[in-house]
Image: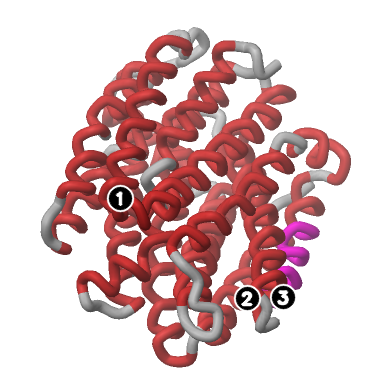
Amino acid sequence: MLADPRRIAVAFCAMGAFLHLYAPQSVLPMMAQEYGIGAAQASFIITACTLAVAATAPFTGALSDVLGRKRVIVVAMALILVPATMTALAPTLAQLIFWRFIHGLLLPPIFAVTIAYISDEWPPNEANGVFGLYVAASAVGGFLGRFIPGLLAGPVGWRGGFLALALCSAICLVAVASLLPPERKFVGASNFGASLRQMVLHLRNPRLLATYAVGFGILFNFIATFTFISFHLAAPPFNKSPAFLGSIFVVYLVGSAAALWLGRAIAWLGRRTFVLCVLVCWMFGLLLSLIPSVTAIVASLVIASTCGLLTQASSTSFVATTAKTGTSAAVGLYVTSFYIGGTFGGWLPGLAYEAGGWPYSLVLVLAMLCAMALIVAKFWKQ
């Protein structure tokens, strides 16, 4: 039940991790205008954070396999208050990107280790449901992270919105420190080197490698879609405000609600069949974004966010339950692949957007979804 303090703590871990990660998306056109840069350059404000996550995630997992779960999570949530605050106060673009990078270095100790904690502390038949809760809470955090800066951009500017997010991070820290019990079923690696050796073994597992590739595609598509849809809606003929751009991320809440049913859906259809159906829906849903109507575009985003969150929850739980040892290291490798995908998703579709607008970016997203479906069909056995 959600009333279980462990589940509440897991939800606050997820929300705290994802409050800031994509927060600039709703105000990115405003930031680009302030700094006099284009869409592709502005995307570095996003990708600086995702690149840092990708660089540190597997080593964070290996470290927590030695030090334990709660200790690493709580320390990271405390340290993250520094870059969360300094991002809002940074006077130059270079300093802003620097603090976004530092922020990204501290995120894997929260979400990668939380996933490992779930895998350790809940039996497999319950873990899928908890992973669904984790993804649902991460979607809420992602929504609030975009919505709050967009809402506050008018009255107090985007910097004031980022300071409000730092306060939210402090609240999450207090909740996790108070409610998350120390791990009980955790079996640590004997030393850091042993954990790294387990990581190498994970890289020899074809099913895990295939899932890492799917993770790459998930965030590639999320970053590409929501970053450049914002530019699309901010430009003529739509000319939408930052407040509106922040509010469209309410579509994440639909996906977060759907993710709570993940365990039942997988039990009914099987993981591979379920994810293949979701990917097909994702492709057709995105085609709606080509209709020159705000209503159609928002409907497209509802479908895309829901399908993306369901695919992410399915992939994450698959990694955590497939890795029999070194769970945190296995999850760390997944997170690395996931955020490398996000880095490319902020760069390549940005070049495509500058060349031909949203339709060009969409072509790359659809191609990635096709590749993901082929990987799932071949490597994810029922």
Badge 2 marks a residue whose secondary structure is: helix
Q: Position of residue 323 (x, y in %)?
A: 55, 34
The residue that label 3 is drawn on is: 288
The first of marks 3 and 2 along the sequence is 3
Q: Residue, x 73% and y 69% (percent of image)?
A: 285
Residues under numbered marks 2 and 1 in contact, where contact means CB atoms less than 8 Å apart: no
Give the spatial CA distance, label 2 vs label 1. 38 Å
Q: Residue, x 34% and y 52% (percent of image)?
A: 155
Q: Nearer the viewer, residue 23 or 258?
A: 23
| Residue 294 horizontal side relative to residue 348, left or right | right
Q: Position of residue 290 (x, y in %)?
A: 66, 82
What kind of residue is marked 3? Answer: Leu
Is-magenta flag for residue 209? no
Q: Position of residue 332 (x, y in %)?
A: 41, 40
- Residue 272: mark in rendering: none
| Residue 350 horizontal side relative to residue 119, left or right | left
Residues under numbered marks 1 and 3 in contact, where contact means CB atoms less than 8 Å apart: no
User: Image height check: is 45 above or below 190?
Assistant: below
Badge 3 marks a residue whose secondary structure is: helix
Give the spatial CA distance, label 1 vs label 3. 34 Å
Q: Residue, x 31% and y 56% (percent of image)?
A: 51
Q: What stretch is highlighted in magenta?
A: 276-287
The residue that label 2 is drawn on is: 366
Circle 3 packing at 10 Å, graded few (<14), some (14-19), many (20+), is some
| Residue 36 horizontal side relative to residue 111, left or right | left
Badge 1 marks a residue whose secondary structure is: helix
Picture quarter with the N terminus: top right
- Residue 156: mark in rendering: 1
